[in-house]
């Protein structure tokens, strides 16, 4: 969301839709820069995919309040929504001025895998995964809450 945007969306995803686990739509790096106080997100922000497949690394950067149409703060996730979504490394950065309800480094129902799981489980579960998607890197969920950022309820390094 660029500065000044007044768009309204139900949810905001850094990754792909992923309607079918057998159809590749994997994302190597997803970045969400939510920069507009005028935008509206009615449910949540996710760094990862919607239904299934892989977002290897996600970055969600927020320096403004994130509200729904009623004006209430919403939740932010570093990984995906659906229980068949997979992430490897997530970063949620709440900068000065950010306001959210809850923040999660992981996903709502999605999974965050370490390298062993990536090597053993993903190829058998998801055909046609590009091996370059999973270059060796860290396997973490990261939540950075800067001075001047507000989390109204709870902060979790993992998922919901």
Image (cartoon, rainbow, N blue to C red):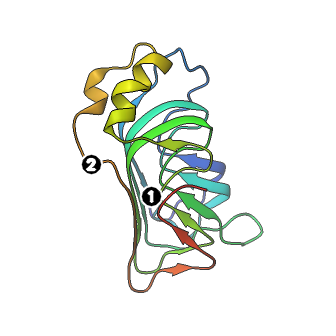
Viewer-nearest residue: 155 or 113: 113
Residue ID for mark 1: 2
Which is more N-terminal, label 1 or label 2?
1
Q: Quadrant of the C terminus?
A: bottom right
Tell me which corner region of the image, top left, top right, bottom left or bottom right, holds residue 109.
Answer: top right
The label on residue 34 is none
Q: Report the front residue among 37 and 92.
A: 92
Q: Is residue 61 above or below residue 111?
A: below
Which residue does the numbered mark 2 point to in the structure image? 138
Q: Residue at x 57, y 55 (%)?
A: 45
Rendered residue at 65%/65% (across/down): 74
Residue 46 against residue 103 in the figure, above or below: above
79 up-or-down from 125: above or below: below
Q: Which percent across, then down, holds residue 100? A: 58, 72
Query: Horizontal and vertical percent for residue 78?
Result: 47, 54
Residue 139 left/right relative to 15 = left
Q: Secondary structure at mark 2?
A: loop
**Residue 25 position within the rendered picture, expressed as x and y whole percent measured from the top left:** 46, 24
Q: CA distance from mark 2 to mark 1?
A: 29 Å
Discs 2/1, front: 2
Residue at position x 59%, y 19% in the image: 20
Residue beneath the point at 74% across and 64% down: 69
Question: Does residue 126 appear in this view?
Answer: no
Badge 1, how many Cα within 10 Å: few under 14, some, many 20+?
A: few
Picture coordinates of residue 43, whole percent (x, y): 69, 55
> As displayed, is residue 17 above or below residue 1?
above
Which secondary structure, mark 1? loop
Residue 104 lies left or right of residue 90; in this view the side is: right
Whether residue 143 appears in this view of the structure is yes
């Amino acid at each position: 969301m660029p500065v000044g945007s007044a768009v309204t969306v139900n949810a905001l995803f850094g990754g792909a839709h992923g309607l079918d686990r057998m159809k590749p739509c994997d994302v190597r790096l997803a970045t969400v820069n939510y920069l507009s106080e005028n935008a509206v997100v009615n449910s949540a922000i996710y760094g990862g995919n919607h239904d299934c497949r892989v977002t290897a690394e996600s970055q969600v950067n927020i320096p403004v309040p994130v509200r729904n149409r009623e004006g209430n703060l919403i939740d932010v996730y570093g990984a995906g929504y659906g229980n068949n979504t997979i992430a490897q490394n997530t970063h949620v950065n709440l900068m000065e001025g950010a306001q959210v309800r809850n923040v999660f480094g992981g996903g709502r129902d999605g999974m965050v895998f370490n390298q062993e799981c990536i090597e053993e489980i993903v190829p058998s579960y998801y055909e046609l995964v590009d091996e370059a998607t999973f270059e060796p890197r860290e396997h973490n969920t990261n939540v950075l809450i800067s001075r001047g950022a507000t989390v109204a309820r709870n902060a979790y390094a993992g998922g919901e």
